[in-house]
Image (cartoon, rainbow, N blue to C red):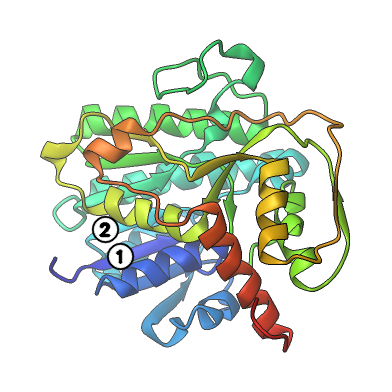
Amino acid sequence: MASHTVLVTGGTGFLGSYVAEDLVGAGHDVVAYDLSTDDRILSKLGVADEVTIRRGDVSEATDVVRAVRETGATHVVHLAALLTNTARENPRSALDVNVVGTNNVFEAARTLDDQVDRVAWASSAAVYAPPHEYDTRFVDEDELVYPDTLYGATKGYNEHQARVYHEDYDLSLVGLRPTVAYGPYRETGGSAFLANIVEKPALGEPFSVEYGDQVIDWQHARDIAQAFRKAAFAPDADLGQRVYNVRGELATIREAVETVRDIVPDADLTVSDEGELPWTQTLDMAAAQRDLRYAVEYDLETGFRSYIDTLRAEAGLEPV
């Protein structure tokens, strides 16, 4: 594949940094476009010197167009968003970033359509209704979309924006609906307990977790990153749709805990069956496998072991 210039919005954040790492590894020039110019995660992933950081705000239309034009970006991976808890606490900002910001990215691609070949952008599994609304184990892209969070609602609106921009202006847009990414350097959030299942025992600390027999989609950040690269570069002729589910390995909380115990035998983990998770996790990803050639590279053992060893190395501990 020839080298291209890819602008990654939200490119210094957790997932953005993994996407940048993946794109650099594939031989592309990467510009991380973000309000934050902190290269901490990019540095930890070893690609800070190979990524250009450009400070910018997706909610500022002129700034987005200028950034795309001046960097010569041929592809955009649009990740910048306020996530679930932040959106709930800052609804006006969620509108500015998630809805207006996404429109600004699409509009920049329309304005510079002779330069920009594709925008791959982040929708979310949060567009789906809660799990009890489905009577099938695997939920495909055509199932009920009825988000119960403001974040999910903004992503649902983004999907309508993308459909109209594709149909009315013939823009090449591909959206992905991932669930929750795990891996080193994730910022804390509503799913922090998922990280703690791995991070606490990695450093010899105890942890108690609920939701024992409930299923989680364990999707390593590097798998989501390669999905965005494939969404950015898949030939238009291969695309049977414009929004795709992507996931990792399905496992219950209890199964995840047992995987950690296999890697860290003295892990002090307690599991209960209290509580109920609100997210739909069992996504059918057959379309992404077919059209994008997406294939999960990190199973639970591989992902958890690399995660644990990274944390232990940073803490000056021996690998497991």
Q: Going 46% across and 57% down the picture, which residue do you hit?
A: 298
User: The residue under label 1 is which amino acid type?
Assistant: Val
Instruction: Give the residue at mark 1.
Output: 6
The disc placed on residue 261 is none
Do the residues bearing badges 2 and 1 touch, measured as CB atoms within 8 Å?
Answer: yes
For marks 2 and 1, the one nearer the N-term is 1
Q: Is residue 91 above or below residue 202?
A: above
Instruction: Give the residue at mark 2.
Output: 75
Q: Secondary structure at mark 2?
A: strand
Horizontal and vertical percent for residue 236? Answer: 15, 41
Q: Going 44% across and 53% down the picture, which residue do you hit?
A: 224
Q: Residue furthest top?
A: 135
Indicate left or right for 110 with 49 as reference: left
Does the rendering let one see residue 10? no
Q: Nearer the viewer, residue 113 or 197?
A: 197
Q: Nearer the viewer, residue 217 or 33?
A: 217
Indicate left or right for 183 with 48 as reference: right
Q: Going 59% across and 32% down the picture, which residue do you hit?
A: 152
Horizontal and vertical percent for residue 6? Answer: 30, 65
Horizontal and vertical percent for residue 77? Answer: 37, 55
